[in-house]
Amino acid sequence: MYDITIIGAGVIGNFIARELSKYKLNLTIVEKDNDVSNGTTKANSAIIHGGYDAKPGTNMAEFNSKGNPMFDKVCEELDVPFKRIGSLVLAFDDKDMKSLEELYNRSIENNIPDVEIIDGDRVVDMEPNINGDVKGALYSPTAGIIGVYELAIALAENAIDNGVDLKLNTEVKDIEKTDEGYKIFTNDGEIKSKYIINCAGVYADKINNMVAEESFKILPRRGEYYVLDKSASYITNHVIFQCPNEFGKGVLIAPTVHGNIIVGPNSQELNDDERNQTQTSRDSLEYIKKTALKSIEKIPFNNTITNFSGIRAEPSTGDFIIEELEKAKGFINVAGIKSPGLSSAPAIAQHVVRLVQEISGGLEENLAFNPRRKMIIFSKLSKEEKAELIKKNPRYGRIICRCENITEGEIIDSIRRNAGATTVDGVKKRVRPGAGRCQGSFCGPRVMKILARELNKDMEEIVKDGNKSNILTGKTKS
């Protein structure tokens, strides 16, 4: 029997798993997909928000303000890319300026440091490509950008390094309360657990309803994005927002930690049965383009290298749901974690640990806990370091992805690690072959060959992402 089962291997579930691995517990993460970070985590804006936007007094406000300053240490420990580049919320008329004042007042109530309202001239000085009609902006210097799926993967790796089990391809079908805790019925057998932490993202309400009456609903919303080539990186140095509306923070323009530009998202309400519908559409992308051009008039959309979409979990309560169920003791919901959920994640994890301590009567510290996880990023090494590494392992001297300068050694490492890659996109999330200008048209087949060799599989068995996303169906020539 496990002490705790965490349902969902997104950034929230993995943060909680790592935080709980600091204690002597028998833990497992259960994930229905074939990889960690396959849901909302891999398809969002990858922004660490300053914390001025959330309504004071809410869970969103509390955990965003506490979570934001925690990322420097976490990312240093886990070797995850993170940059504090600051954000600007633009105002183009008097109504927008009034909105900035409201956001500024919220920043004061939320204890967000160094936020200020600046005039249009200073905005243009900071960002020369901004629309010259700008009247002012709210400047939040503590906002940042992060490699979000790299973070989720690193958290899972580190949790496993510290004793946590990970069960992929394991979908929860039902849950039964027992005298000892819970019995979890999955497609791959039963799991017994004293406690359950529900981090199932857009399916969190479905998991909740297995043990208790419905108390909230998750309303799925789809957001679509453009990713621009690194040649467009000149257009902005900060995260650029427009004034928020009833659907969220609106269309943003931001650098990524890897040097691209991301533009989006829109916000499209979906039906209950569309929670996995991540297609993009011409109309939605045209809306994003038209809206973004209000902020920066000359965005080189002709340099788009890919589009994508993700589903976010809009809670019917309007706020994060983080609590033990009153009628199902030992079952903790961590649900409705929409934006600023990523920014709040480390603080949410610490709060959940405190809940577990209260429920269990206390936890014993794991003195062997190791907070560190290290990646080899060949392109960032010195010439001397590269030569020494190639001498030890010649596979680091073979470039597989020309766009991102990714070596065979890095790809093999991403496969052999704990929570290692088993799919083409799994390798892409970890070390970026296929994330560049050609989007895998050159390196894709070579990555497949490496995966097949390392996993002892036939090429036809290698999938792009999900278990049914086959790339090859057979040989064209015998």
Image (cartoon, helix red, strand yellow):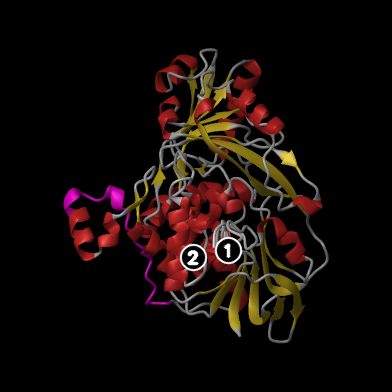
Residue at 47 percent of width and 39 percent of height: 143
Q: Which residue is mark 1?
A: 9
Location of residue 7 (image quadrant)? bottom right
Indicate which disc residue 410 carries: none
Q: Which residue is mark 2?
A: 156
Whether residues under marks 2 and 1 lie with C-beta atoms below 8 angstroms apart, the answer is yes
x then y, percent, for residue 96: 62, 21
Q: Residues within 10 Å of mark 2 (few under 14, many from 20)?
A: many
Q: Is residue 417 visible?
A: no
Residue at 22 percent of width and 54 percent of height: 386
Name the residue at the right extreme.
213
Amino acid type of the residue tagged 1 in the rendering: Ala
Mark 2 residue element: helix
Q: Is residue 116 visible?
A: yes
Q: Main secondary structure of the magenta part?
A: loop
- Compared to residue 471, the image places residue 364 above or below, namely below
Amino acid type of the residue tagged 2 in the rendering: Ala
